[in-house]
Amino acid sequence: MKRIYTIEDVCIGCHLCEVACITEHSLSKDPVKAFLHEPLRPISRCTVEEQNGGVLSLSTTCRHCDEPDCLRACISGAIQKYENGVVRIDTEQCVGCWSCVMACPYGAIQRNLTKKKANKCDLCPDRKNPACVDACPNRALVFKEGNQK
Amino acid sequence: MNYVIIGNSVAAVGAIRGIRNIDQQGNIIVISRERHTAYGRPLISYLLGGLVTEKRMAYLPEDFYEKNRVNLLLNSEAVGLDTDKKRVKLAGGETVPYDRLLIATGGDPFVPPIEGLAGKGKVFTFTTWDDAAKLKGISHDINRVVVIGGGLIGLKAAEGLHLLGKQITIVELADRILSNAFDRPAGRIVAKKMKANGIDVITEDTVVKIEGEGADIHGVTLKSGDFIPCDTVIVAIGVRPAAGFLKGSKVEVNRGIVVNDLMETSAAGVFAAGDVAEARDFFSGQKNPMPIWPDAYIQGDVAGVTMAGGEKSYLGGLAMNSLELFKVPTISMGISNPLEPKEYEILTFQDLENYQYRKIVLKKKLLVGAVLVGNVERAGIFAGLIREKVDVSPFRNSLLAPDFGIIYLPREVRNALFAPYGKVA
């Protein structure tokens, strides 16, 4: 399956992947409207990590594992792996127990504390390429066929 | 090939998927003594408290059994096993033949003999959907509850009942609640939060007598001599592997059903997984029951694959719990509270005022356990470091950092996890 990979040497730590992710999953799909006017604005499903004031940075996201630890830990069945390989959380079904946060070795599941729901990458089902990949100005994120490990 | 699975919770689901990954043809029969299709068993406290509806209890997509061509026998209890003739005996008298059998019956709540318990009406255990439904059904008749046992089940029952506005006292024998998963500071933080919410937590004491007349309960007497008035008692001392029906069979049962790393029992063609099984521990290698949801799935998966002739091996049980009580999230994993602290190195960070606590347990160069209270973000990275036995010495000083993440790991580990190099399609 196609996965998002990170080339940390060319990441400039701009966080545009996070902005694009939030925008894509917002109601308006407009960054300004989403950030200023949506009270339940989504949180980002990718996480930009930085060290030494940004000298080192990289964006991390869900690996859509072949055998997802999050799915195995999920107590409500909200996390399923679909036939196309995508691992998704059904937000309605999620009870916010954070078992997936406990299990994911990539640290790729976020806690949406406002909604008390777990949050993770869905590879942007409405788009050809995930929004974060398209937004990356220095092509530090690539979306290509590849395995998990 | 005839696959028979006794039990229909998470281990069974892992096994069904495991079998179907290898064998799309064989027959799968699932025998369950409950009347529901697979449900999120840990959700029963949410159901009791009104946080989820019955519809949300379903653990699987609606078409799961049909898609995987599973013949599901609900309301059917296995009462015996003949390993020579390879047949399971059901309560109704019928027998079900098998080529490969998986026992995934889970645990039964343990109710010790307590003086005055016999004949009392409102005494409950709390491990099934029906237990929660029963409690919910009579909740108008419940005012004051004593929960015996401050483990996971007791705390969840207490939380559900608290949401219904009941007055609750938890009585725990150990010096803290959740003594299996927590150390003292973590137990204290959560107990403090519970007390702040009006739940009484009594530790280092136990119920010796249930007082009352006829079926009515008036209260309980503790070992210390204290009397606590109540009208309902929840017994949440623990669960025992549900292996009673194997008496007289050739399946070896110690504390649980003894299995090897392929989830095979001592009887040919018979496998076990989940809370009923006694499998290898990740650290010690010793066999012990590990009633942990994700672990049950993993054991079920290994059993399913090996039953169908595939190759997979169990890597050992790693205890982990995620529990949020009164808005204080907690996650613990691995060896969180070592009995022989000298062999380990322990790093901690505490801010009890703000309900924050972080503990890292190291053994030489390896991370072996963690407890996180409050900020539980990205806890799974620790689980990965434990499982993969990563040498944490290069970044051990960062393990307590509140923003601990992937970037603290060595470059080659980061690249192995996230970079495109070498990831061929």
Image: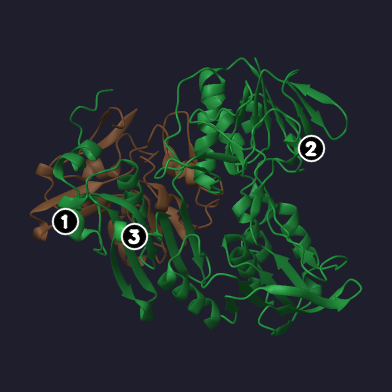
Chain colours: A brown, B green
- Disc count in the image? 3
Residue positioned 33% across, 48% down in the render: A108
Residue linked to disc 1:
A50
User: Mark 2 near mark 1, Cβ–Cβ under 8 Å?
Assistant: no
Q: Chain of mark 3?
A: A
Q: Is residue A122 depicted above or below A2 in this figure?
A: below
Density class for disc 3 (Cα within 10 Å; few <14, some 14-19, many ≥20) is many
Tell me how far mark 2 sits from mark 1, CA to CA.
Answer: 56 Å
Residue positioned 28% across, 22% down in the render: B425
User: Of A62 and A70, which appears nearest the observer?
Assistant: A70
* Position in image of residue A136 (x %, y %): 18, 44
Tell me how far mark 3 sits from mark 2, CA to CA.
Answer: 54 Å
User: Of B359 and A121, which appears nearest the observer?
Assistant: B359
Q: Nearer the viewer, mark 2 or mark 1?
A: 2
**Kind of residue at disc 2:** Glu
Q: Chain of mark 1?
A: A
Q: Which mark is residue B77?
A: 2
Q: Which mark is residue B247?
A: none
Residue linked to disc 3:
A34
- Same subunit, tags 2 and 1: no
Q: Chain of mark 2?
A: B
**Kind of residue at disc 3:** Ala
Q: What secondary structure is marked by label 2? A: loop
- In which quadrant of the rendered view does residue B257 lie? top right
Q: Residue at the bottom extreme?
A: B226
Q: Earlier in the sequence, mark 3 or mark 1?
A: 3
Residue positioned 32% across, 54% down in the render: A44
- In which quadrant of the rendered view does residue B227 lie? bottom right
